Image: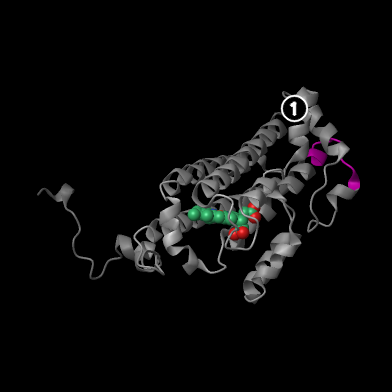
Amino acid sequence: MSKENEIYTDFINRMSYGEYLHLDTLLSSQKRLSDHHDEMLFIIIHHVSELWMKLILHELHTAIESISKGNLSPAFKMLSRVSKIQTQIIHAWDVLATLTPAEYMEFRDKLGQASGFQSYQNRLIEFALGYKTRHILEIYKKDSNLHKQLQLALQAPSLYDVSIQALAANGLHIHSELLTRDFSQPYQADPSVENAWLEVYKNVDKYWDLYELAEKLVDIEDSFQQWRFRHMKTVERIIGHKKGTGGSAGVTYLKKVLDHRFFPELWDIRTKL
Ligand code: HEM
């Protein structure tokens, strides 16, 4: 073999691919509680989703920081990446849909009360997008570090809060209370925000950056709802209308969550334009 094509085989003193990625930890984390074949799919689909959620959070936090400093362009790149990741996790439902009700019933009891409802990364994403559900924090009381992390995330301005601040920073009128509001409270739609977005959409050349920001937000919310919808339908396909392991009414609960809107004015203005 020529020198240019030399493949490294001696890793005694070199870092290997597996070491860099800590594959020993990653690949030893899929521990089935039953000896049923299909439980592996169930665990891996959750692990893959949680890994993508980790990257979504990484991107969202930096995008929020960037928008809050008035640097919109770098945030656009990150928000586009979030959208692409969302496409991945939406398609992940196709893989899980190969799990039949009979297969799931083989190991469902082993889950006890564990449920995706307790996914803290999902809550951190919801908080970052502005859906602040304080009562959820109760679940994480047994882990004080995690509880603290969620509390801080609850209090922090969301992607929508900093977007509203960007509207104001660009000279659009926003009710002043909104800029200094208690960010741990759920966001309530506001007429000044609606008017500001209307102004942006009617004058796209003047407000191109804000217009682009608005469309990125709509992309993310649209995909989030698609994810919620595919989750609900996949759950219906697998457990019908049984109660969830987390204690909710199951599909009825998941349908109700679909009504929630992250960026309400951005949807409302579409009727008014
Ligand atoms: C067989 C597969 C699945 C079933 C039957 C299922 C069922 C459910 C049910 C019934 C709920 C409502 C809470 C409860 O009572 O448990 C729920 C919530 C949730 N699940 Fe799943 N799920 C499945 C797979 C997944 C996967 C792969 C993920 C990815 C991480 C996931 C993430 C979530 C999240 C984030 C919630 C909270 C939703 C909210 O409160 O808006 N689930 N799931």
User: Residue 94 lies in what quarter of the image?
Assistant: top left
Question: Within the magenta stretch, is there residue 173?
Answer: yes
Task: Give the residues drawn in magenta, as a range.
Answer: 167-176
Toward the viewer: 70 or 63?
63
User: Residue 10 lies in what quarter of the image?
Assistant: bottom left
Toward the viewer: 218 or 62?
218
Q: Residue at x 84, y 49 (%)?
A: 179
Quadrant for ligand 1? bottom right
Determine the residue located farthest toward the right in the rendered image.
176
Q: Residue at x 32, y 63 (%)?
A: 18
Is residue 125 visible from the viewing direction of this image?
A: no
Relative to 223, say whether 143 is above or below: below
Residue 230 % position (x, y): 55, 43
Q: Which residue is mark 1?
A: 270
Q: Quadrant of the C terminus?
A: top right
Lateral position of residue 149 relative to residue 58, left or right:
right
Lateral position of residue 126 relative to residue 44, left or right:
right
Determine the residue located farthest toward the left in the rendered image.
1
Relative to 117, say whether 255 is above or below: above
Residue 39 % position (x, y): 40, 60
Toward the viewer: 270 or 171?
270
User: Residue 247 lies in what quarter of the image?
Assistant: bottom right
Residue 125 % position (x, y): 63, 54
Query: Is the CB of the residue bearing disc 1 within 8 angstroms of ligand 1?
Result: no
Question: Within the magenta stretch, is there residue 16?
Answer: no
Q: Residue at x 73, y 45 (%)?
A: 160
Residue 72 % position (x, y): 67, 40
Q: Amino acid at mark 1?
A: Arg
